[in-house]
Image (cartoon, rainbow, N blue to C red):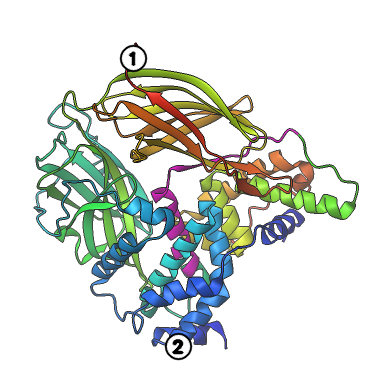
Amino acid sequence: MADWERELTEALQEGPRWPGDPDRLWQRIAARLPAAPAAGTAGRLAEVQAREGQVRGGGTGSLGAASGRLRPGWRRVAAGAVATAAAVAGLGLLGTALRPGPGGLAPATGESTASLGVRGETRVLGEPRPGSPLRFAVAVAGEAGSRLQVQSGALEVRTPLGDLVWEAPIPEFASLDLGEAESRRAEVVWPAAGSPGHYRAGIRLVTVDPRGRVEEVGLAPAEIFIPYPAGAVRLGQVPVARPITRGPVTARVERITLGPDRALVHFALTGSGLAGGFQWSLLTPAGIPHPHLGTDYRQEEGRVVGVAAFEPVPAPIRTLVVRLGRVGVAQDGGEVTELPYVWEWEVPLDPGP
Amino acid sequence: MNEVELIRRAQAGDRQSCAELFRRHAEQAVRTAYAVTRDWETAEDAVQEAFLRAFAALPSFRTDQPFRPWLYRIVVREALRLARRRQRLVPVAQLPRETEMPSVESEALENLRRRQIRAAVYALEERLRIPIILRYFVGLTEAEVAQVLGLRLSTVKSRLHEARRAIERQVGPEMRDVPWQTGSGN
């Protein structure tokens, strides 16, 4: 091992120690272990899904907080997908150019991803509408130099936070033997897409590699946006431009842009040693969090400038609370800690008198 | 008891062997998950789920294969899944500090340098940080890192190289003393 590699290894080995308790973590695991480890691989998808259901129902901390956000009106349908053997044309995975959907819009497409010797692609066909059937084209293909057995496959629709809202098995992906450059395609129909908002649809496969190892892989999530009805959400721009300083960090919300498909919080952070991360939230005055879609940022001239995106703001909401927390800074020793502060702005959305 | 025997007993349903396997790998698994998630609570949750999945899949594990890459593949995947699920926490590469702590003691300087290296690693973007952690903290070979991440070996080599350059930019030129070794995966 070269000197620099040894130096890097030593530096990492000295790194932050786990402050938790191994025995306590083992107790959490042991409580969920079956009497004996599962034998065989049949029904693995069902086992995994059952376990995920346990996690969602019994999570702690932020996991639990995130788990209770199934949208009202969403149904969990175990079966009901209509999967056909019809060939699905136009999947980029198969080397064909993508085509616009029937409505003339570019279809939402999960990028073709490679994982564990298999590639997948998910496309949304047509324009999503609340309560209407939504068709998906899905495809899987073997990677070069690999041979893989697919035990079962399913299409999942999840919220941006990962909560499962709908799933259906894909019969065409059951008991497949995928060699190099071999592929299978299918079409799946979500019988009744529900509430407006953002979702991700992706393929989940249970695979067995040539060494007999069973893996569960998620592939090719495609973004879906089910539009809100006209007049249902607020539109426009709300200037804020008010800096708040807590400890070594000054945060400034420049403005909030209220759009038909998302609400954007434009922000800038300055401070010495910003590191690790930060977290933006958008809440009603009653403290109800608004679903967060993602945050983009860039670093320029010693500050972080970015945009945090949330679901559109319903029209009846008149005031929003913008909150920043979990801001990390590097200590003198180089370790990253989160500051114990909250930066908060209360923003009226109606024009002043 | 050696690890292969432990795994065989765990495969047969011996819960004490499962517990021992967990104890042998827990600390490093959680620290690895922390390198992905940057949050101890999320790291613990990831390791919890990873071990549950590992124990469920253990009957299909072949004991003539190395256990650690198999386990860390699950750990990293769970950590990534939970980190993305909790994506409201936005990772940010570390901005330069205005001052660094001066020291005239050589030992203190060495410690400071290690801390700087560590901070530089933790400030790397995810696609560079995870290969570095797996290679130099977990101790996997480049080929094993490629297997864990589902990447080609050449991609792993390229990312390790890019990561090293990024670390060098943060901590100074000493890491350039020895030319970058592309290595054979070991």
Asked if residue B73 is among those painted magenta in the image, a careful observer would answer yes
Q: Check disc 1 and report the residue beneath it.
A: A351
Q: Position of residue A90 (x, y in %)?
A: 19, 39
Q: Position of residue B97 (x, y in %)?
A: 71, 36
Q: Check disc 2 and report the residue beneath it.
A: B9
Q: Residue at x 56, y 70 (%)?
A: A21
Q: Quadrant of the C terminus of chain A?
A: top left
Looking at the rendered structure, the secondary structure element under dot 1 is: loop
In the image, which residues are magenta?
Answer: B71-98
Disc 2: CA contacts within 10 A as few (<14), some (14-19) or many (>=20): some
Looking at the rendered structure, the secondary structure element under dot 2 is: helix
Q: Position of residue A309 (x, y in %)?
A: 38, 32
| Kind of residue at disc 1 | Pro
Residue A224, relative to residue A306: is it above or below? below
Q: Is residue A109 left or right of residue A32?
A: left
Q: CA distance from mark 2 to mark 1?
A: 70 Å
